[in-house]
């Protein structure tokens, strides 16, 4: 049995996407790799914005699947920068599913911590700007 949640209002909504039949296995569960991809995209959007330019994923520090996702779920990924180093950023991403079966249900699907490195045009590490504004 899943727990009901509310979507967070203290984080940045990075992406929202509908899980489609092409994203599922034969039993109708969404592939974990597809969810991981969405989480990485969400984290990279927030990291790129904060780094003010190109970034690359260098590590998935933690990734926990809490509940399965199904075809028709509306997946929302919320992200927040949790650490800024000299050239790297760590982003925490939480993914939720909005389901509309017999009633609306919001399920906390996954939580992950990913590390990104800011890079220049030659793909060499560069400092993350101290100023958040662009």
Image (cartoon, helix red, strand yellow):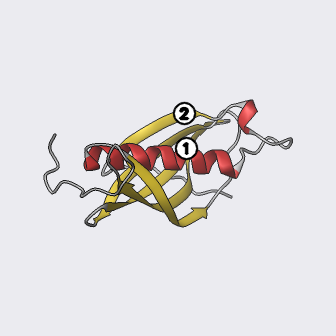
Question: Which corner quadrant of the image does residue 45 belong to?
Answer: top left
Question: From where the camera sits, is residue 59 visible?
Answer: yes
55 on left or right of 27:
left
How many labels were placed on the picture?
2
- First-in-chain label (1 vs 2): 2
User: Which residue carries the number 2 mark?
Assistant: 17
Task: Tell me the tag on residue 125.
Answer: none
Look at the image and tell me in which quarter the N terminus lies: bottom right
Up the image or down, 55 lies above or below 87; here it is above
| Relative image position of residue 127 (x, y in whole percent) | 24, 58
Look at the image and tell me in which quarter the C terminus lies: top left
Q: Look at 13% across and 52% down and name the residue there.
A: 131
Q: Look at 29% across and 61% down and name the residue there.
A: 87
Question: Which residue is the extreme one toward the right?
Answer: 26
**Front: mark 1 or 2:** 1
103 or 117: which is nearer to us?
A: 117
Up the image or down, 42 lies above or below 94; here it is above
- SS at circle 2: strand
| Relative image position of residue 41 (x, y in whole percent) | 49, 43
Question: From where the camera sits, is residue 103 visible?
Answer: no
User: Which residue carries the number 1 mark?
Assistant: 38
| Relative image position of residue 61 (x, y in whole percent) | 50, 68
Measure the C-alpha gap from mark 1 to mark 2: 8 Å
| Relative image position of residue 94 (x, y in whole percent) | 47, 54
97 or 88: which is nearer to us?
A: 88
- SS at circle 1: helix
14 or 67: which is nearer to us?
A: 14
Q: Look at 64% across and 35% down and name the residue there.
A: 19
Q: Are marks 1 and 2 in contact (CB under 8 Å)?
A: yes
86 or 73: which is nearer to us?
A: 86
């Amino acid at each position: 049995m899943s727990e009901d949640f509310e979507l967070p209002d203290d984080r940045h909504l990075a992406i929202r996407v509908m899980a489609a039949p092409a994203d599922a296995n034969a039993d109708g569960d969404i592939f974990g790799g597809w969810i991981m991809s969405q989480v990485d995209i969400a984290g990279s959007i927030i990291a790129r914005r904060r780094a003010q330019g190109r970034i690359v994923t260098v590590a998935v520090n933690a990734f926990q699947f809490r509940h399965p996702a199904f075809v028709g779920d509306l997946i929302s990924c919320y992200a927040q920068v949790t650490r800024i180093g000299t050239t790297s950023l760590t982003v925490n991403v939480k993914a939720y599913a909005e389901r509309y079966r017999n009633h609306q249900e919001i399920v906390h699907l996954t939580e992950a911590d990913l590390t990104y490195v800011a890079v220049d045009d030659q793909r060499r590490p560069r400092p993350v700007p101290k100023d958040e504004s662009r």
